[in-house]
Amino acid sequence: MLKSASVSDTPAIAERRRQFANTIPIVVGFSAVRALMETAFVFATRGVSWTAAILWTLPSWLLLLPLATGTVLLAIRFPFDRRNRAQSVVVHVVACLTFAIVHLAVITPFRVLIAADPVNWDHLVRAFMIAFRLLFYLDVMTYWGIVGMYLALYYSNLRTSLAEAQLAALRAQLNPHFLFNTLNAISTLALKGDQVAVTETIGRLSGLLRAALEEHTEEISLAREMDFLDDYIAIQRIRFADRLCVERHIASDTLDGLVPTMILQPIVENAIKHGVNAQRGVGHVDVSAVRRNGSLVIEVRDSGPGFMPETVRDGIGLANTRARLEQLYGARQRFEYGSAPGGGAEVRITIPFHDTLP
């Protein structure tokens, strides 16, 4: 029997609960700051002790918490999205005025009692007008401060979620691309009747895919990335045998540096395709990594004909690599490629060096 999901299990409600939980520090923080400002004002203007100032403003403190909570809930419901921006403006302007008036109206009787005045209409009106003159602007600032902090957190999380979704899409695009190319290599070996090579390639492919799919982080250490690359090169060596020569020049102080997961595989794939597959003799691929001025610089070179001027354009691998670097590092990264001065193609990735240490 199928189990139906309750309303509380819906993604939208779960997301709103998460948003509200994340804004609890905002509610507490703004309420505390607002209360301290009011207490300091009473202390400075009325010439009373801090204890008396705290007692005077205590009702205001206690009321701010539910009002601030309601403000956050309203900001969650009306976050100034493009489709309902005008409605959100109207709602929040009305809510802001309501926030201030309700706050002042509720604390007015307590102010009269604390002042030891008779609780009558004249004293209530007088106390309300004084509170309105002194505290109304502070209530307005408090309301919009809470809304502003929530919106800053909301849109920051939104941008982060969007970036994560785009990175996931890029990785999802890369994995089939790599898989299809490897399966084509296996089919070529099968047509040649090399059963041993087919069996070994499938085994290595299985291990590589298992490791890649189990890796859920966007960044891994360069040492781990080189392990992935070694598995991939082992698959290619089964296909090319002695025609493929890969050399590594990885500085030891770069191995702990974090790099995007499987960032090197599509670049080396292009190097093998154009630097080895296009040649009759031995094709060379050189992979190097060094630290330079606070950055990690990774280079991949091949001994092929290089990039032809009339055909230089981003394929799936290069376009995917560029997009992932831009998503992860923004303007702090550089992705360069072209024909090397001594012949062949060269690709260079420069990213900020950061490691697993706190």
Image (cartoon, rainbow, N blue to C red):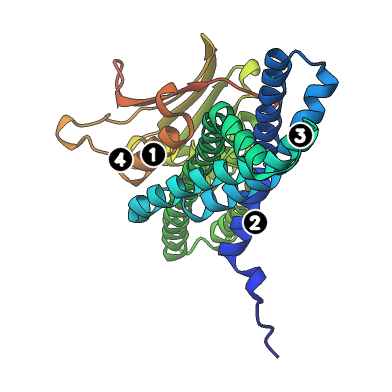
Q: Position of residue 105 (x, y in %)?
A: 62, 44
Q: Nearer the viewer, residue 141 or 25?
A: 141
Whether residue 140 sits left or right of residue 347 in the image: it is right
Nearer to us of marks 3 and 1 is: 3
331 to the left or right of 150: left
Circle 4 SS class = loop
Q: Earlier in the sequence, mark 1 or mark 2?
A: 2
Q: What is the spatial separation of the Cα atoms under label 1 and label 4, in whole angstroms?
A: 27 Å
Residue 101's place in the image compared with 356, above or below, is below
Q: Position of residue 195 (x, y in %)?
A: 55, 63
Nearest-to-viewer mark from 2 and 3: 3
Marks 1 and 2, how far apart at CA: 33 Å
| Mark 3 / mark 1, whichever is N-terminal | 3
Q: In the figure, is residue 61 to the left or right of 205?
A: right
**Mark-to-mark CA distance, 4 and 2:** 57 Å
Residue density around tag 2, few if under 14, some if 14–19, many if 20 or more, within 10 Å: some
- Seen in the picture, residue 14 relative to 345 is either above or below; the reply is below
Q: Nearer the viewer, residue 274 or 251?
A: 251
- The residue labelled by disc 2 is 17
- Which quadrant is home to the C terminus? top right
Disc 2/disc 3 C-alpha distance (Å)? 44 Å
Amino acid of disc 4: Ala
- Residue where numbered disc 4 is placed: 278
- Cβ–Cβ under 8 Å for marks 3 and 1: no
Q: Amino acid at mark 1?
A: Ala
Helix, strand or loop at disc 3?
Answer: loop
Sequence-wise, which precedes: disc 4 or disc 3? 3
